[in-house]
Amino acid sequence: MANQKTTSAASRSNEPRAELGNWLRALREAQGLSQRQLAEALDLDYYTFISQLETGRGKIPSARYRDWAAVLEQDPKFFMKTLLSYYEPEAFAMLFDESNEN
C-alpha cells in the first residue's frame, strides 16, 4: 500500500515537469528543429537529454538558460521565469505572485 502512495505522489510531482516538457517540445518544433538538431545547436553531448526534458525528466542547468532561450528564440527573462515556475514553484510564487505580497 505504501508503495502505491509513493508512486502517486511521485507522479503528481512529475506532472508540472511533464507540462514543461510539452512546452519545450512545442518551442523546439516551432523552430523546426529535431531533438538531435537542438542538441547540436546547444553543443550537448547527447540528444537523448532533450528527450528526457520533453518527457518531464531532468532539468536544464541554470547556467544554460540563456543559451536555450537564444536557440529557441525566446526572451531570456520570459524563458527563465517560465522555467522557474515549473522547477521552483514556491520560489516563483514568492517572487511573482502579487496576491502573496504583504
Image (cartoon, grey):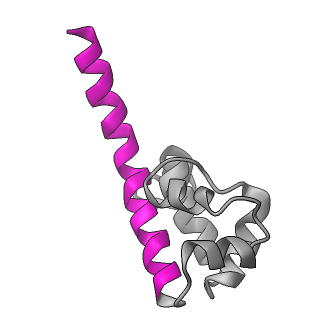
Foreground of the two, 11 or 100: 11
The quarter of the picture where residue 50 lies is bottom right
Position of 53 with respect to 42 (left or right) is: left
Q: Main secondary structure of the magenta part?
A: helix
Quadrant location, the N terminus: top left
Which residue corresponds to the image point at 79% horizontal and 59% vertical from the top-left?
63
Residue 42 included in the magenta stretch of the image: no
Q: Is residue 14 above or below residue 73?
A: above
Residue 66 spot, x, y in % from top left = 75, 73
The quarter of the picture where residue 20 lies is bottom left
The quarter of the picture where residue 79 lies is bottom right
Residue 59 spot, x, y in % from top left = 60, 51
Q: Is residue 25 visible?
A: yes
Foreground of the two, 86 or 35: 35
User: Which residue in the rendered view is the most extreme toward the top?
Assistant: 1
Foreground of the two, 13 or 102: 13
Q: What is the total number of numbered labels drawn onto the structure image?
A: 0
Residue 26 included in the magenta stretch of the image: yes
Q: Is residue 77 visible?
A: no
Position of 86 with respect to 16 (left or right) is: right
Position of 68 with respect to 5 (left or right) is: right
Which residue corresponds to the image point at 37% horizontal and 60% vertical from the top-left?
19
User: Which residue in the rendered view is the most extreme toward the left?
Assistant: 1
Q: Which residues are magenta?
A: 1-29
Which residue corresponds to the image point at 51% horizontal and 60% vertical from the top-left?
51
Which residue corresponds to the image point at 31% horizontal and 39% vertical from the top-left?
12
